[in-house]
């Protein structure tokens, strides 16, 4: 089993390295994936080296040296809040599964911090030495996420500094930002304890000083949140930590442009989960996102538009976006030729909302959308435009004349029906059928 997994990892690593070497415009995520694959290979190497001793050690060792969960000799004994001792990887797996009770006593845990049991560790070490056995060095004890015990100790020390003096907070925040960017495995450490994210946010949550007086500290903390949210196992935990979304909203309103951009990117990443879309929408985060969209900072636009698009996939957020003024902002920018690609995608999503259809009809959007189809070379933009026009055509007969005139002058819709994407062809043909039917009825009358 281990050999098969190692072969799979080696093939994956070869593929990643080949893509990095052969493609000058390779994605930086490939480097992260290659690093994660190397960590996984390292973990398998350690596992293979120690597996031959495991059976003999476990059979012979005293019961108090065995983990209650794995029934094997403990390598990294830690104490749970209830005072019970477990091997770290197995109790972490228990906690990551959402359990908040002690496996032995069934008591509800007051916290999920794991404290090394140095006494038991030393006793196990002495017992192994007396029998010519060797436990792996904790610094080399790599788990499935590629995390060593040294990584974990350093991580905890950085979190502790977030409660100390301002210079220490700044240093720790900067290092956490860099580590969570460079080391995907480091992001996973935040899911091991419910207290980790609140500790990270403490400088911002204890008052306004973190944002108004020390923008660099705010930027580092918000960017660390962004880095954490990239890790799939963190998305739910990050979004549901009570302080996170309010602090991201504050950053959208008052941070530096890089902080605001990264706050928008964090909301976009978190919104990959449908439950998070609902939570973020209910929190009122669409309004500051729309305000930032209206300001139009070039460096922020892609992340802001992506966040709004993702959030508006669910129906209740479409209503919130319309109420918060998204339509006027989006139409103004599209008509001015600004960020047309991203904004057309949002408009196509919003177009299923009845109020949006009404406002589109009253705002001069139809000629603009027809012009984009006529002049654009982007198939996706044409597809989004015709999809929006199809919705308008179904709901607002007063706009049929504008579409007929466009078709008579340029053949815009019929050309798209012949040469567009499959979805664009379908929508264009739907419009043409309605327009032709209306003409035939007029002639018949």
Image (cartoon, rainbow, N blue to C red):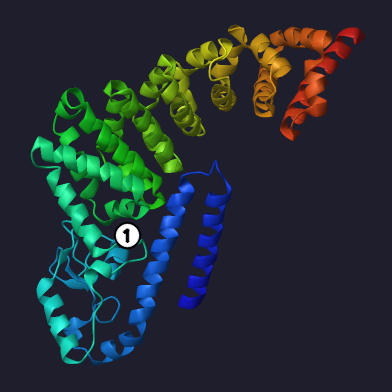
Where's residue 25, x and y in %?
A: 54, 41
> As displayed, is residue 28 above or below residue 361?
below
Q: Judge left or right: residue 193 versus residue 110.
A: right
Report crowding for label 1: few under 14, some 14 to 19, many 20 or more residues within 10 A (C-alpha). Answer: some
In the rendered picture of this protein, how many numbered marks are placed on residues?
Answer: 1
Q: Please state which of residues 141 and 199 is positioned toward the viewer in this rendering.
A: 141
Callout 1: SS:
helix
Q: Judge left or right: residue 34 versus residue 14.
A: left
For residue 138, what is the image quadrant?
Answer: bottom left
> As displayed, is residue 420 above or below residue 38?
above
Q: Please state which of residues 373 and 81 is positioned toward the viewer in this rendering.
A: 373
Q: Judge left or right: residue 11 versus residue 294.
A: right
For residue 437, what is the image quadrant?
Answer: top right
User: Farthest residue in the right direction?
Assistant: 444
Q: Could you tell me which residue is drawn at 35 percent across and 48 percent down?
A: 182
Where's residue 64, x and y in %?
A: 17, 83
Q: Please state which of residues 133 and 203 is positioned toward the viewer in this rendering.
A: 133
Where's residue 118, x and y in %?
A: 11, 72
Q: Is residue 396 visible?
A: no
Q: Could you tell me which residue is drawn at 69 percent across and 28 percent down?
A: 379
Q: Please state which of residues 225 and 136 is positioned toward the viewer in this rendering.
A: 136
Where's residue 5, x and y in %?
A: 49, 71
Q: Judge left or right: residue 170 versus residue 89.
A: left
Quadrant where the C terminus sits is: top right
> As displayed, is residue 83 above or below residue 335?
below
The residue to which callout 1 is attached is: 96
Q: Is residue 379 visible?
A: yes
């Amino acid at each position: 089993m281990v050999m098969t997994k190692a072969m799979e990892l080696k093939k994956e690593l070869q593929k990643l390295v080949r893509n990095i070497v052969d493609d000058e415009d390779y994605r930086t995520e490939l480097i992260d994936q290659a690093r994660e694959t190397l960590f996984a290979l390292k973990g398998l190497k350690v596992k293979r080296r120690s597996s031959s001793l495991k059976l003999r050690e476990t059979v012979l060792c005293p019961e108090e040296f065995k983990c209650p969960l794995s029934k094997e000799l403990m390598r990294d004994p830690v104490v749970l809040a209830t005072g019970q001792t477990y091997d770290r990887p197995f109790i972490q797996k228990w906690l990551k599964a959402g359990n908040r009770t002690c496996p032995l006593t069934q008591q509800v845990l007051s916290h999920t911090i794991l404290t090394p049991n140095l006494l038991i560790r030393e006793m196990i070490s002495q017992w192994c030495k007396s029998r010519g056995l060797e436990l792996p060095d904790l610094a080399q004890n790599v788990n499935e996420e590629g995390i060593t015990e040294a990584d974990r100790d350093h991580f905890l020390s950085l979190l502790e500094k977030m409660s100390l003096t301002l210079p220490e907070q700044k240093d720790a925040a900067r290092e956490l930002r860099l580590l969570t960017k460079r080391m995907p495995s480091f992001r996973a450490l935040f899911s091991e304890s419910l207290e980790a994210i609140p500790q990270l946010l403490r400088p911002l949550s204890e008052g306004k000083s973190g944002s108004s007086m020390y923008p660099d500290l705010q930027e580092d903390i918000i960017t660390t949140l962004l880095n954490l949210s990239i890790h799939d196992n963190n998305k739910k935990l990050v979004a549901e930590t009570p302080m996170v979304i309010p602090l991201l909203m504050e950053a959208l309103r008052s941070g530096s442009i890089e902080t605001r951009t990264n706050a928008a990117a964090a909301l976009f990443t978190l919104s990959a989960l449908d439950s998070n879309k609902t939570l973020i929408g209910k929190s009122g985060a669409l309004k500051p996102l729309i305000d930032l969209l209206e300001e139009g900072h070039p460096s922020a636009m892609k992340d802001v538009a992506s966040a709004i698009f993702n959030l508006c996939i669910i129906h209740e957020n479409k209503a919130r976006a319309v109420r918060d003024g998204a339509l006027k902002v989006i139409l103004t920018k599209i008509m001015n030729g600004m960020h047309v690609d991203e904004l057309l995608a949002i408009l196509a999503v919003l177009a299923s909302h009845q109020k949006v259809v009404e406002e589109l009809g009253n705002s001069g959007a139809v000629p603009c959308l027809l012009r984009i189809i006529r002049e654009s070379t982007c198939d996706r933009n044409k597809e989004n435009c015709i999809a929006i026009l199809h919705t308008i055509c179904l709901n607002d007969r007063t706009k049929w004349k504008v579409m007929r005139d466009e078709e008579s002058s340029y053949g815009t819709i019929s050309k798209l029906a012949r040469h567009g994407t499959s979805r664009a062809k379908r929508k264009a043909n739907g419009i043409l059928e309605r327009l032709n039917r209306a003409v035939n009825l007029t002639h018949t009358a």
